[in-house]
């Protein structure tokens, strides 16, 4: 796996590159704008140039910010505009994939249909791929299980541009006991049955501060929470995922980024056959 962190861009892409390099990242994830504001953003030529140097060093994924709700895409104009704005910013930078939460809605069936419409429109308007991220199941959030994510995926015409981002903490909090390798095999099999092959395209590697099935989304440091080190050892050593990016979204406390990276680097890498001699 290519391992990295979600990193801020508020001090410029040059600073982001220096921080990513310092931490030993092989991939990073960013918000392309302030994630807690509806205000739109624009990039200057200098920003684009700095981003190009960052992207030349490692793959960069965008993550949709906190406010746009895909499940309200057709019900409130600001959600639609915010989603399009972030997709356009990502394309302007040259980012190829944006990770999205699927939103929340009191009427789950309607919310799933609206989220699918949002994904479809983004794919039609912008040359970007989408990774649907599974949810912890808190409140009225949708996408807490693979069946709900498949309900969105099956409504989209451009399915080849839609994949999955599996968040380990969210899986655990939604009731998948990812501490078991047998459960991981069941998850992989279910993904292939519901979505087809090679649909797992990205990972969020997070331990959980809350217990199995809590539906409370609280990320924690690798191996220090309710999940433990086992699943991260399994994923790091799984050759089926060796080509994928994996982002840690662990709390930014003290020097814990360094500690979390050290833990992930200590885990065995998969034995991938090399080219014939």
Image: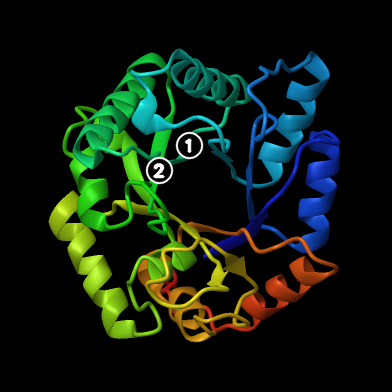
In the rendered structure, the answer to whether residue 259 lies left or right of residue 234 reads right
The location of residue 212, given as percent across then percent down, is 41, 77
Inter-mark Cα distance, 2 to 1: 7 Å
In the rendered structure, the answer to whether residue 36 lies left or right of residue 189 reads right
Q: Which residue is mark 2?
A: 131
The location of residue 211, given as percent across then percent down, is 47, 78
Q: Which picture quadrant has residue 156?
A: top left
The location of residue 114, given as percent across then percent down, is 28, 28
Q: 43 above or below 104?
A: above
Dot 2: within a 10 Å radius of its alpha carbon, few (fewer than 14), some, or many (20 or more) residues? Answer: many
Where is the C terminus found, in terms of image quarters? bottom left
Residue 79 shows in the view = yes
Q: Which picture quadrant has residue 209?
A: bottom right
Q: 227 above or below 193?
A: below
- Colour mapping used in the image: rainbow
Seen at 73% across and 39% down, the residue is 54
Q: 76 above or below 256?
A: above
Q: Dot 2: what SS?
A: strand
The location of residue 5, given as percent across then percent down, is 66, 56
Cβ atoms under marks 2 and 1 closer than 8 Å: yes
Q: Which mark is residue 269?
A: none
Q: Dot 1: what SS?
A: strand
Q: Which residue is mark 1?
A: 97
């Amino acid at each position: 796996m290519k391992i990295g962190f979600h990193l801020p861009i508020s001090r410029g892409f040059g600073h982001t590159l220096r921080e990513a390099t310092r931490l030993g990242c092989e991939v990073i994830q960013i918000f392309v704008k302030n994630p807690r504001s509806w205000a739109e953003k624009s990039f200057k030529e200098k920003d684009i140039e700095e981003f190009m140097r960052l992207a030349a060093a490692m793959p960069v994924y965008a993550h949709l910010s906190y406010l746009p709700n895909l499940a309200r895409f057709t019900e409130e104009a600001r959600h639609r505009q915010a989603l399009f704005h972030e997709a356009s910013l990502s394309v302007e930078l040259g980012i190829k994939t944006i990770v999205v939460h699927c939103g929340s809605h009191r009427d789950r069936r309607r919310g799933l249909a609206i989220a699918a419409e949002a994904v479809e429109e983004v794919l039609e308007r912008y040359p970007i791929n989408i990774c649907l991220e599974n949810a912890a199941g808190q409140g009225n959030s949708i996408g807490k299980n693979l069946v709900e994510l498949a309900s969105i995926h099956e409504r989209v015409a451009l399915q080849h541009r839609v994949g999955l981002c599996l968040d380990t903490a969210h899986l655990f909090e939604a009731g998948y006991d990812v501490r078991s390798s047998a459960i991981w095999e069941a998850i992989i099999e279910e993904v292939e049955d519901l979505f087809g092959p090679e649909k797992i395209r990205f990972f969020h590697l997070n331990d959980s501060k809350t217990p199995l099935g809590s539906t409370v989304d609280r990320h924690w440091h690798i191996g220090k929470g309710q999940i433990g080190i086992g699943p991260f050892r399994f994923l790091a050593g799984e050759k089926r995922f060796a080509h994928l990016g994996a982002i840690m979204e662990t709390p930014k406390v003290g020097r814990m980024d360094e500690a979390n990276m050290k833990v992930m680097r200590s885990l065995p890498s998969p034995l991938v056959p090399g080219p014939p001699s």
